[in-house]
Image (cartoon, grey):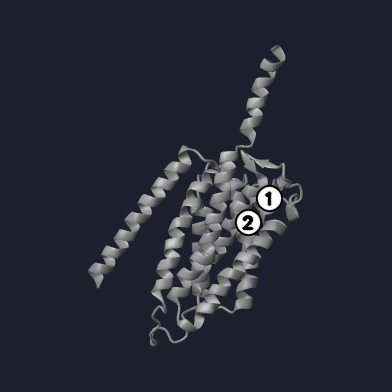
């Protein structure tokens, strides 16, 4: 009886370590965020370019998904989330290169570390893919692969570490719930620099360059809308009230933005 009473608290604590509800939600959120890139973002961009470049944009998003996933596995995850010793304020270490030490039993909070690693991988996939829209139709496929590989390693992983991996921005108390800094500011600056360096598309503005298929763009935007529930609510890393609030705000904000865009287009045209 006494032994059972003494054991009960430890069992309760053990049950709190791995939460099956949190894990199930994060598995779902991970799939949703991956779906945002392929096919969501790929279709969104494919509809906006000229017909001769549709396959190019689709393949860029597809190839980025594959390549960034492997680079994240090789060293990206370790650089972003491991302790970097004396340089930890700026970059993580390489102790988990090739996912060394990440096992079936490894945990990150209340979810398996494999799930956390893969969820963060989907962020490392979509962030470079966002940049594609800034240089669509203006960069060679091979050059794009090299650029994205270098960018993930020397820009995305360090910035991710600064904010979420125990780096200097995190120490300053910076709050980035779902990637406003790590994903959007990061990709936005990279896209702006790339667009400035590459310049205008050949023939612009003298040659008309209308979108080839806005149906693709609407389908892609719809997929992104749904996927953002995984992106935002999944960033809580748990199935709780904060995740529910993030989901509600995501839906309300997206609906308001969509109506605002539709009315502005209606008025201007």
Q: How many marks?
A: 2
Mark 1 highlights which residue?
92
Q: Is residue 152 above or below residue 239?
A: below
Residue 103 — which label?
none
Q: Is residue 195 above or below residue 87?
A: below
Task: Answer whether residue 163 is visible to the viewer in this image.
Answer: no
Residue 157 — which label?
2
Quadrant location of the C terminus?
Answer: bottom left
Q: Residue 44, position in %: x, y? A: 45, 69
In terms of depth relative to the viewer, which is nearer, 151 or 234? 234
Residue at x-position 48% and y-position 47%: 233
Marks 1 and 2 sit apart, C-alpha to C-alpha, by 8 Å
Q: Is residue 144 above or below residue 172?
A: below
Residue at x-position 73% and y-position 52%: 99
What residue occupies the far left of the structure in this picture?
267
What residue occupies the far top of the structure in this picture?
2
Residues packed near mark 1 inside 10 Å, few (<14), some (14 to 19) or many (20 plus): many
* Residue 123, quarter of the rendered image: bottom right
Residue at x-position 58% and y-position 69%: 62
Pointer 1 with pointer 2, Cβ within 8 A: yes
Residues packed near mark 2 inside 10 Å, few (<14), some (14 to 19) or many (20 plus): many
Give SS at disc 2. helix
Give SS at disc 1. loop
Q: Residue 195, position in %: x, y? A: 49, 73
Q: Is residue 112 above or below residue 6?
A: below
Q: Residue 219, position in %: x, y? A: 43, 67
Sequence-wise, the earlier of marks 1 and 2 is 1
């Amino acid at each position: 009886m006494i032994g059972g009473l003494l054991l009960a608290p430890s069992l309760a604590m053990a049950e709190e370590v791995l939460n099956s509800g949190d894990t199930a939600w994060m598995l779902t959120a991970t799939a949703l965020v991956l779906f945002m890139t392929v096919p969501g973002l790929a279709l969104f961009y494919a509809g906006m370019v000229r017909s001769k470049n549709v396959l190019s944009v689709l393949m860029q998003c597809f190839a980025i998904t594959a390549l960034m996933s492997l680079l994240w596995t090789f060293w990206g995850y370790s650089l972003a989330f491991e302790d970097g010793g004396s340089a930890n304020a700026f970059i993580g270490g390489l102790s988990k290169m090739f996912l060394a030490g990440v096992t079936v039993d490894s945990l990150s909070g209340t979810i398996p570390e494999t799930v956390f690693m893969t969820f963060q991988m989907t962020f490392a996939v979509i962030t470079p893919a966002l940049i594609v829209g800034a240089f669509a139709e203006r960069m060679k496929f091979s050059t794009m692969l090299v650029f994205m590989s270098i960018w993930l390693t020397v820009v995305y992983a360090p910035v991710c570490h600064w904010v979420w991996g125990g780096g200097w921005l995190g120490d300053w108390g910076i709050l980035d719930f779902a990637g406003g800094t790590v994903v959007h500011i990061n990709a936005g600056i990279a896209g702006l620099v790339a667009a400035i360096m590459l310049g205008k598309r050949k023939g612009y503005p003298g040659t008309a360059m209308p979108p080839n298929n806005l149906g693709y763009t609407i389908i892609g935007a719809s997929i992104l809308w749904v996927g953002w529930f995984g992106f935002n609510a999944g960033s809580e890393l748990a199935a709780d009230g904060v995740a529910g609030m993030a989901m509600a705000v995501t839906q309300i904000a997206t609906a308001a933005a969509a109506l605002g865009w539709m009315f502005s287009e209606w008025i201007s045209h």
